[in-house]
Image (spheres, rainbow, N blue to C red):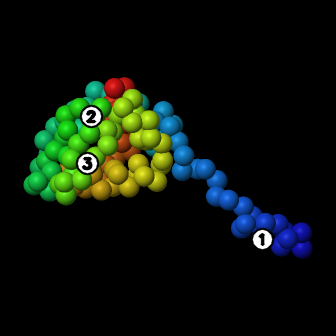
Amino acid sequence: MKYLLILPLCLLAPPLAAQSTTPADLIANYAAEAGVAASAERGQALFTASHTGGKPDTPSCTTCHGADPRAGGLARTGKPIEPLAPSANPERLTDLKFVEKWFGRNCNSVLGRDCTSAEKADVIAWLASL
């Protein structure tokens, strides 16, 4: 009976801030999922390389985000993209839900597939190192 009284209170409680995070937390979580340490060098290579698996008009992350993630980019729609590097944009890489959405959309556009946890850790490690 006492559990029936607690349940409604739990439903009224605000959601936990589980979505808020830091770049270091993201790197640690993705690296743990992958079972390998993150590499900023691999992240830079992935970000700057041209790929053939995705959409022909987005062969590289740099197509939209530019070569320097500390500067802004331009989406294919013409919409400005804020800098990716947390050093230039402290709001970047602080919301797990947004980071997952960003990787989901962009990895499929550039690579033609989802990024692996190791690739996510690598890219974030590189962006956080700038």
Tag 1: residue type?
Answer: Pro
Tag 1–tag 3 contact (CB < 8 Å): no
Read off the residue under disc 3: 80
Local secondary structure at mark 3: strand
Residue occupying the point 64% across, 53% down? 16
Position of the N terminus by quadrant: bottom right
Q: Compared with residue 11, is residue 18 higher up or lower down, i.e. above or below?
A: above
User: Which marked residue is nearer to the observer: mark 1 or mark 3?
Assistant: 3
Residue for point 42% across, 52% down: 98
Residue 109 x/y as whole percent: 22, 55
Mark 1 or mark 3, which has the lower sequence index?
1
Residue 32 in view (yes/no): no
Q: Nearer the viewer, residue 92 or 49?
A: 92
Foreground pick, 53 / 101: 101
Q: Report the amino acid beneath label 3.
A: Pro
**Residue 112, quarter of the rendered image:** bottom left
| Among the two numbered marks 2 and 1 on one chain, the one whose residue lies closer to the N terminus | 1
SS under mark 1: helix
Mark seen at residue 8:
1
Above or below: residue 30 compared with residue 128: below
Give above or below for 11 relative to 96. below
Tell me if residue 45 can be seen. Answer: yes
Q: What is the crowding at mark 3: few (fewer than 14 residues within 10 Å), some, or many (at least 20)?
A: few
Q: Identify the image quadrant of residue 124.
A: top left
Q: State left or right for residue 102 relative to residue 59.
A: right
Name the residue at 26% across, 34% down. Answer: 71
For image coordinates 24% across by 53% down, the residue present is 79
Compute the Cα span from label 2 to label 3. Answer: 11 Å
Mark 2 lies on residue: 71
- Residue toward you, 32 or 51: 51
Kind of residue at badge 2: Ala
User: Which element carries disc 2, helix, strand or loop?
Assistant: loop
